[in-house]
Image: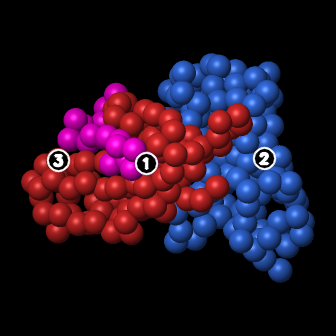
Amino acid sequence: EVQLVESGGGLVQPGRSLRLSCAASGFTFDDSAMHWVRQGPGKGLEWVSGISWGGGNIGYADSVKGRFTISRDNAKNSLYLQLNSLRAEDTALYYCAKGLPGNAYSLGYWGQGTLVTVSS
Amino acid sequence: QSALTQPPSASGSPGQSLTISCTGTSSDVGGYNYVSWYQQRPGEAPKLMIYEVHKRPSGVPDRFSGSKSGNRASLTVSGLQAEDEADYYCSSYAGSNNFHVVFGGGTKLTVL
């Protein structure tokens, strides 16, 4: 069974940093593209960042480019998102999601999310 | 990197068919066959319903179908059921040389 478990969220002051983690199991992690998607309170889904199976291809939404960094450790079956210079508008539930086999851009499995709240 | 455009709401009676549109540009929806649709019920994580414009993952009822014409994609739900009431989001690959995905703003589907 595919499982994606996010952690690392919490309450943080504006301008500070946070590191999110996603522990993956039940599938061959190093064969899969992975993504972070967020959802602000009462808002829609927003793609944040994605990374190819080997880490050689990475993308970011304009809203986070230069502040967030995605990475993965295939030996640990883990995906990460480093969030720097956090702003109030970064407050959201952050989901980790897995691309389909042969299609990195359709997100076939999602975790339950980790909540990030940016407030003073 | 603009979001794809979806109607904010849609509604239909049980048994009816309903179509939700998703409008993008030639740089995303119109340029690639990587359109996906997701269903999200309150308090739950999104669920993939359609991928690559019209394909259904295992377990998704065939009442759900997808299509695309030019820069516009559509999700059709036939034989509406109460359990179909949810938010629906489209997404598309949007990068010719990097990893980039864009979502629509979401459509709240109400079964009357």
- Residue A89: mark in rendering: none
Seen at 13% across and 63% down, the residue is B13
Seen at 60% across and 67% down, the residue is A40
Image check: A3 left or right of B15? right
- Residue B16 among those drawn in magenta: no
**Marks 3 and 1 share the same chain:** yes
**Marks 2 and 1 share the same chain:** no
Chain of residue at mark 3: B
Can you tell which quarter of the image residue A22 is in? Answer: top right
Crowd rating for badge 2 (residues with CA inside 10 Å; few <14, some 14–19, many 20+): many
- Number of marks: 3
Chain of residue at mark 2: A
Image check: B57 left or right of B81? right
Q: CA distance from mark 3 to mark 1?
A: 23 Å
Q: CA distance from mark 2 to mark 1?
A: 32 Å
Q: Which residues are magenta?
A: B58-74
x then y, percent, for residue B38: 42, 47
Q: Quadrant of the C terminus of chain A?
A: bottom right
- Its colouring scheme is by chain
- Residue B71: mark in rendering: 1
Q: Colour of chain B?
A: red
Residue bearing the label numbered 2:
A81
Q: Which chain is blue?
A: A
x then y, percent, for residue A108: 49, 35
Looking at the rendered image, the disc whose residue lies closer to the viewer, 2 or 1, is 1
Residue nearest the observer in this picture, B74 or B108: B74
x then y, percent, for residue B70: 39, 44
- Residue B78: mark in rendering: 3
Looking at the rendered image, the disc whose residue lies closer to the viewer, 3 or 2, is 3
Crowd rating for badge 3 (residues with CA inside 10 Å; few <14, some 14–19, many 20+): some
x then y, percent, for residue A44: 52, 63
